[in-house]
Amino acid sequence: MFSKPELDYLKSQRLARIATVNKKGQPDVVPVSFEFDGTYFWVGSHDQDIFHRTIKYHNVKNGNSRVSLVIDDLKSVDPWRPRSVKVYGVAEVMDHKGIFGPGKYLRITPTISWSMGIEGLPVKKDEWRLRTVHKS
């Protein structure tokens, strides 16, 4: 689903922002650590004892499995060089032994992804590269 430069970028990053939605339609965005195994994104908590009390966990557990994930940084300020991968996906609560040890994690299956500034080209205004649509 991802190009080699996108995969290299994803493997070099550890912080993302995940957006979930509650039963009433209220979105919630929170920074998270993540890992990507080449197929799935995994989001857990540095404290597995409290993960089951987080908003993101409850939103997914309560049936709102559609999520958005953004991984981004600034490669440079002068010249301005933002880099970003944005993913729409479907999340499930799963047992996993990940970066925070064994416990409950959100396993996110990507369905659509976009990237910006990853391929080494200068970023033009409002430039997002739709990379792949993966139907699940």
Image (cartoon, helix red, strand yellow):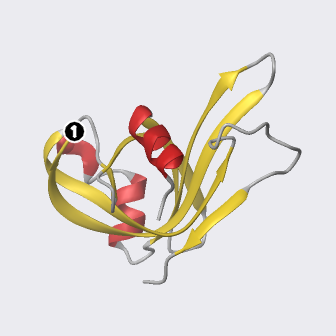
Residue at (54%, 60%) from the top-left corner? 87
- Whether residue 21 is visible, yes or no, is no
Question: Disc 1 marks which residue?
Answer: 99
Query: Residue 106, how many percent across, how many down?
Result: 31, 59
- Whether residue 12 is visible, yes or no, is yes
Q: Quadrant of the C terminus?
A: bottom left
* Label 1 element class: loop
Disc 1 residue type (three-letter): Ile
Residue nearest the viewer, comparing 134 with 98: 134
* Residue 71 horizontal side relative to residue 48, left or right: right
The local crowd at label 1, few if under 14, some if 14 to 19, many if 20 or more residues have their Cα within 10 Å, is some
Residue at (67%, 37%) from the top-left corner? 120
**Which residue is situated farthest in the bottom direction here?**
136
Question: Quadrant of the rendered structure where residue 77 is?
Answer: top right
Residue nearest the viewer, comparing 68 with 29: 68
Query: Residue 55, how many percent across, how many down?
Result: 42, 54
Residue at (26%, 65%) from the top-left corner? 93
Query: Residue 83, how many percent across, how many down?
Result: 65, 37
Residue nearest the viewer, comparing 35 with 127: 127
Query: Residue 48, how many percent across, how many down?
Result: 19, 43
* Residue 31 horizontal side relative to residue 116, left or right: left
Q: How many marks?
A: 1
Residue at (33%, 56%) from the top-left corner? 38
Residue nearest the viewer, comparing 105 with 13: 13
Residue 52 lies, with reference to residue 25, above or below; the image says above
**Which residue is situated farthest in the top direction here?**
78
